[in-house]
Every structure is written in C-alpha cells, then in structure tokens.
Image (cartoon, rainbow, N blue to C red):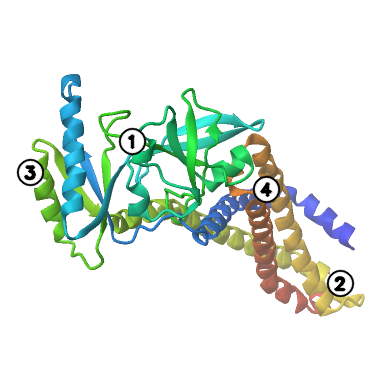
Amino acid sequence: MKRHLLKLIWNRKRSNALVVAEIFVSFLVLFVVLAFGLYFASNYRKPLGYDYGDVWRVEVAMHPIPDAQENEAAMRYQSILAELERLDEVEHAAGVLFPPYFFGTSENLFEIRGRPVKVHTNEGTDGLAEVLGFELLSGRWFGPEDDAANWKPAVIDAELAVAVFGRTDVAGERLPFFDEEHRVVGVISDYRKGGELSGSFPHVFFRVRPGVERGLPPHVLVKMRPGTPAAFEESIVERLSSVAPGWSFTVQPIERGRGSALRLQLIPLLLGATVAAFLILMVALGLTGIMWQTVTRRTREMGLRRAVGASARGVYGQIVFETVILAAAGVLLGLAGVVQLPLLGVGSFFGQGIYISATLLTSGTIILLAVVCGLYPGWMASRVQPAEALRYE
C-alpha cells in the first residue's frame, strides 16, 4: 500500500514540486533561527566572568596627540584615574581598551596544538580586576610588582589556558605565540566581553602603563558605590574636563550599554523568526490546499476503497501519510543542505550538540506541521461513503 501511495505522489510531482521547494526553504530558515536561539539560550546560562553592576564606562576622546605631547597626555590620563579614585562615590577606576558590551575587538589567529585558534587580545591598567571583579583561578592580576620584570605580564582566561597548556594553574608560564616574551601572571575564569548571549573565546589581557610601554586606553571603567544616582554622570564629566581641558568625555552605566548590546543581538533573531513563521504559514496553507484538492478530485477512489472494505480510519491515515511524505521530501532536501554546513566551516561556533538539536527540532517541527495539515483533509476523505463513487459511473 505504501509503495502504491509513493507512486501516486511521484505521478503528481509537478503539482507537488512547489510545496516541496517551500518546505526546503522553510527548513533552512527555521534551522538557522533555532540554532541561534539554542546558542543564545545556552550562552545565557553560563557565567559572564565579571560583574558589571554599578560599573560606569567613561569614553575618553583625546583627539590627535602629537608625538611631542605624548608624555603630557600620559600624565593627563594618570591624573584622570587619580581624580576618579579621589571621589567619594567611586570605589575603583581603571583603563581598558575593549570594555564589556563593546563591539570592538582585536582577534589574532594562532596555531595551538596543531589547530587554528582565534585569540581575543585586550589591554587594561593595574586596577581593572578590582573594577570588574574578575575571578582569579590561579596567580594574580598584574601590578607594580611587574615593573622590574624583563618580560611582559599577561593575564589569560581559563579557555586560553586549557587550549595552550591543558590546565589552568599556569602562572609563570611563557605564552609561546607572541614575538615579545610574555609570561602569564594569572588566570581568570572565561571572559565573555560580548555579554550573556555571546560565546566565550580565548582571551588575553596585556598590561597598560600609560606613557611607559603602551598607548592610552580610550575607555575608563569606574566602579561606583551602590545607590549613586545617574545625575552624578554630569559631575564626573565636569571634574574630568577640568583635569584634562580640551578632551571630551562621555559617561554611561554599563547596564545601559548592556541593553543596547542585547537588543542588537536579538533583533536579527526576531526578524529571522518572523520570516520563518511566515514561511511555515505558507507551507501549512500549501499542504492543506494540495491535500484538500486531492481529496476533492479522488472522491471516486475513496468511495471504492470504502466499498472494498477499507475503514474510515484507514482512509484517514492514507491522506495524513501522503501529507507526511510530501513534507519528508522537503525535509530530506533540507538535511542534505544542512549537512554541508560543517564541511564548509559555517556555524562551527554552535558546537555539535546545538547543531544536532537544531536539526532534530527543525525536522520534527516540519513533520508535525504536515500531520496537522493532513488532519482536516483526512477527515473529509474518511467521510466519503461508497455510494459517492456511483456518481462517476
């Protein structure tokens, strides 16, 4: 019987081709939406590696600095940090190149243990660990005790430590993939700069000593005392403008930047979900319409089946089965396309678990939709009586 139904579906391949193509496109779009949705949900449950509560970001616009004035600019920058530390409302202040929820980043591709690994590099001053509340797994944060060292201190996160050394207790080890000699002085927990929805990437912090070894970080993070009102932002700008005339400052809580970052990450997902929902609706209408038309045209066949002893339940199941076969054809085409993605290196950051889960959920959703779409046409077919076939004699 199933072989006969497959043959009937094949004979109507031209009329079914459009629906199968819609299912194929819907499968791909729904897979992408579900994969990103599962990826974001998985990331949201992981720790950030820092505490952004009561932390404000001060963006420092220093304008072009001539070489002859670099020392003066460095002194101004140090004065800014010192002035912030003197405020009663401020607990700690530190400079950083790429603060949390900031979309700028610096990536370097290195070969580690025979495989390419993207390492995100960042720079910070000595007090950054106190501002962001980093969890030190081993060692310490860099500080004045590193001034006399003949190598550059670095703090790495646990992911990079495991990727390079296979463990996290690596204080004192040399980082092997930089031209200058850098030694690890501490290891922090995985640092997810992009926020709750972003994945974790191997991360390394280099020490910044304004005017000594590196440039001036364009951002200053300030750990405020709990309960500091937002109106204090203006007071910070006024104080810093008096310390560094000619420079401009913008102050906002990281919490505000967090909201903007999350919206920018979620908006594409919501747009994709809207498109996927529209395509699923089109598929549902197409499947229901085709099977409805099929039942209408095959009234004689249904009546004859009932006349030779087929039950209403059997006829019902036949129509639902045909609907599922149509959907399965589109799903198989979608699976053939999705299987190519890992081979092309697309979406490798999802991980195998999310990739498989998204594939199964997408396939299950399409098949379940086909079953639902076949219910009403199947019910119509099951109500055809044997006498209906006589009308065509």
Q: Are marks 4 and 3 in contact (CB under 8 Å)?
A: no
Q: Earlier in the sequence, mark 1 or mark 3?
A: 1
Q: Position of residue 105 (x, y in %)?
A: 40, 38
Q: Position of residue 269 (x, y in %)?
A: 47, 54
Question: Relative to residue 334, is residue 388 depicted above or below?
Answer: below
Disc 2 from disc 4: Cα separation: 37 Å
Question: Does residue 100 appear anywhere in the picture?
Answer: no
Classify 10 Å Cα crowding around label 2: few (below 14), some (14-19), many (20 and above): some
258 in relation to 167, above or below: below
Q: Nearer the viewer, mark 2 or mark 3?
A: 3
Q: Residue at x 26, y 38 (%)?
A: 218
In the picture, the quarter occupied by the N terminus is bottom right
Mark 4 = which residue?
334
User: Given the image, on which type of amino acid does mark 2 rest?
Assistant: Leu
Residue on which disc 1 sits: 208
N-term mark: 2 or 3: 3
Q: In this rendering, would 263 be left or right of 9?
A: left
- Between residue 57 and residue 35, name the one nearer to us: 57
Could you tell me which secondary element the residue under label 3 belongs to?
helix
Whichever of callouts 4 and 3 sits on the residue coming sooner in the sequence is: 3
